[in-house]
Amino acid sequence: MTAHPLRIVHCLRAPVGGAFRHVCDLISAQRVQGHRVGLICDASTGGAFAEQRLSDLSRDLELGLVRIPMRRTPSLSDLATMRSAYRDLKAMAPDVVHGHGAKGGVYARILGTLLRRSGLDTRRFYTPHGGSLHYDPKAVSGRVFFAVERALERVSDGLCFVCDYEADQYRTKVGAPRIPHRTVHNGLRPQEFEPVIPAPDARDFLFIGEFRELKGPDVFLKALRDLGDETGKTPTAHMVGPGEARTDYEKMAHDLGLGEAVAFHGAMPARTAFSFARAVVIPSRAESLPYIILEAIAAGLPVITTRVGGIAEIFREQEKELVPAGDHAALAQAMQRVLTAPQETRRKAEQLRDSLSDGFSLKAMSDGVLTLYAEGGVSGAVSDETTHDPRHLQAANQSGPDCRAADGSARA
């Protein structure tokens, strides 16, 4: 229990992917610490999988769940949506509004500022999760988004980055933060370090990621084709995740002659998907600090991924194993090494798994966020017990809802 229980509302757009997983974990941990928590998110994203996860999470949402239409791109409809959300948020009377992802961050800080003008002492925090930081600073769209981020900093009380890379990108593209800020790595629950045993009929590789260009499904398919051309035998694979463009990639697989070598699936629990294959491939073109990579490593599976975002902060001494983004030939070579050197691959996977247990825990993540709240002016956000007692997250570690979709998305 903290010195002063807080009323905390998290806001994000899509209830899928890594940002949603992050929010789910924070909600469960903060509830166990004695806080009252609420959630605002999009009403049209995630399908049946998101509906089930939100239902599981509802027991932790004492302040309630508000679902509103929240489009990915800016629109005039946002004004009407914000007006509706403001009424619900004001009824929650939050001490903290914490926005996640570009759209969630805009909503949280604007609505939080309106609450302050109404007389509430609401503090506003923002975690980008990549979001607008993925844009090219040379492009007009990038310059616009970064100017908006800078302007919104004036109505923010703290910035939380999920990796050092994200913090560096913010400094480079937006500017040095002028408000309290800190890096707080994503964290895993103890049970997530239990190994996943591949099923007897497991395929060679598993792609986990939203079916969109950013996540590199096209790079994965081309790498499979390259392997088939080189060896005369195409490796088998599963591709798992949400996304309206899935049918486009199914057609691409057919056009590349992959036929039955690749099976496509919608979103499902990550550890269920892990049992489908003997190695995981995350060929993203951009990321922050993706949960899906942490989860796959903790499950004991070999992971082949790209040198983007904060991924190098996970791999540390094995950073040289990362491949350039968008390079299907390099990805094929890394996948071939996994097929031809299984014992060495397993040894490296075990080493990487052991290196995660200390720096990527749920307790460290939750305590870091609460500390930022305190630095941003939230009275009673932390206490000695919260900071130092390792028992305070035991219940959340054991019983929090599984909000992970096997989509690998880091953006919201």
Image (cartoon, rainbow, N blue to C red):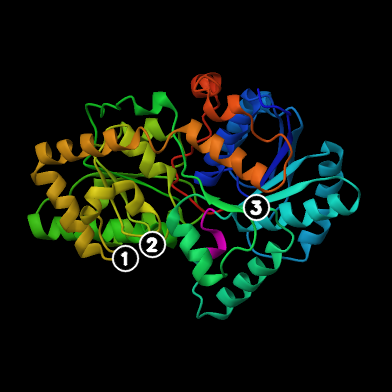
The residue that appears at 10% across and 59% down in the rendered structure is 230
Crowdedness of circle 1 by 10 Å Cα count: few (<14), some, many (20+)?
many
Instruction: Identify the disc placed on residue 285.
Output: 2
| SS of the residue under disc 2 | loop
Q: Quote the CA–CA distance across marks 1 and 3.
A: 34 Å
Q: Foreground residue, 63 or 74?
A: 63
What residue is shown at x 24% (from left), y 47% (from top)? 261
267, 136: nearer the viewer: 136
Name the side, left or right, on which 200 lies relative to 408. Answer: left
Of label 1 and label 3, which has the lower sequence position?
3
The Cα atoms of the two marked residues, 2 and 1, are separated by 6 Å
Spot occupied by residue 10 in the image (x, y as percentages of width and height): 68, 42
> Is any atom of residue 342 visible in this view?
yes
Looking at the picture, how far across and down is residue 353, in whole percent? Answer: 28, 35
Is 95 left, or right, of 309 in this rendering?
right
Q: Provide the residue designation for mark 3.
A: 158
